Amino acid sequence: MGLVVIFCLGVLNFAAHKAVLESGHSLLGQVPWLIQPLGGRLSLVVEFAMLLGAMVMVAAGSTGWAWLYALYSIVNGIAAWLIFSGRA
């Protein structure tokens, strides 16, 4: 069950991340070292590595990693909401 939840959170994280990348928000210019390599997709590679790591750890029986990834997803969602609402 934990893997399914982590996977669903990962899909939401990727959707929010890609939407923020495509928004062209001015905050993206402050982290060019993460955005410019691979045509702006290096940050998506990092996102995938985090998802994969969380899924491996949860599959190994560590529920703490599931909670950490859930917390990360909440923070990620709030950040995306702030960017799209014009508050950031």
Image: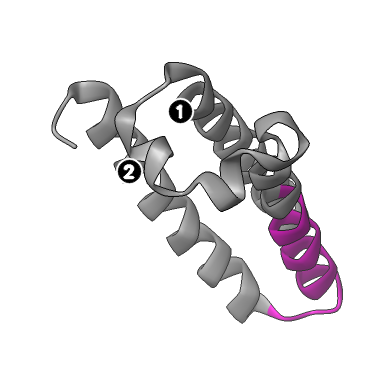
Q: Is residue 38 above or below residue 68?
A: above
Q: Residue at x 71, y 35 (%)?
A: 41
Q: Quadrant of residue 63?
A: bottom right
Q: Residue at x 63, y 38 (%)?
A: 36
Q: Is residue 20 above or below residue 38?
A: above
- Which quadrant of the figure contains the C terminus? top left
Crowding around mark 1 (Cα neighbors within 10 Å: few <14, some 14 to 19, many 20+) is some
Question: What's the CA distance linking mark 2 and mark 1?
Answer: 9 Å
Q: Which mark is residue 79?
A: 2
Q: Residue at x 86, y 78 (%)?
A: 60
User: What amino acid is labelled 2 in the image?
Assistant: Ala
Secondary structure beneath dot 1 equals helix
Q: Is residue 2 above or below residue 48?
A: below
Q: Which mark is residue 20?
A: 1
The majority secondary structure of the magenta stretch comes to helix
Which residues are the magenta region? Answer: 48-62
The percent coordinates of residue 15 (x first, y second) are 58, 27
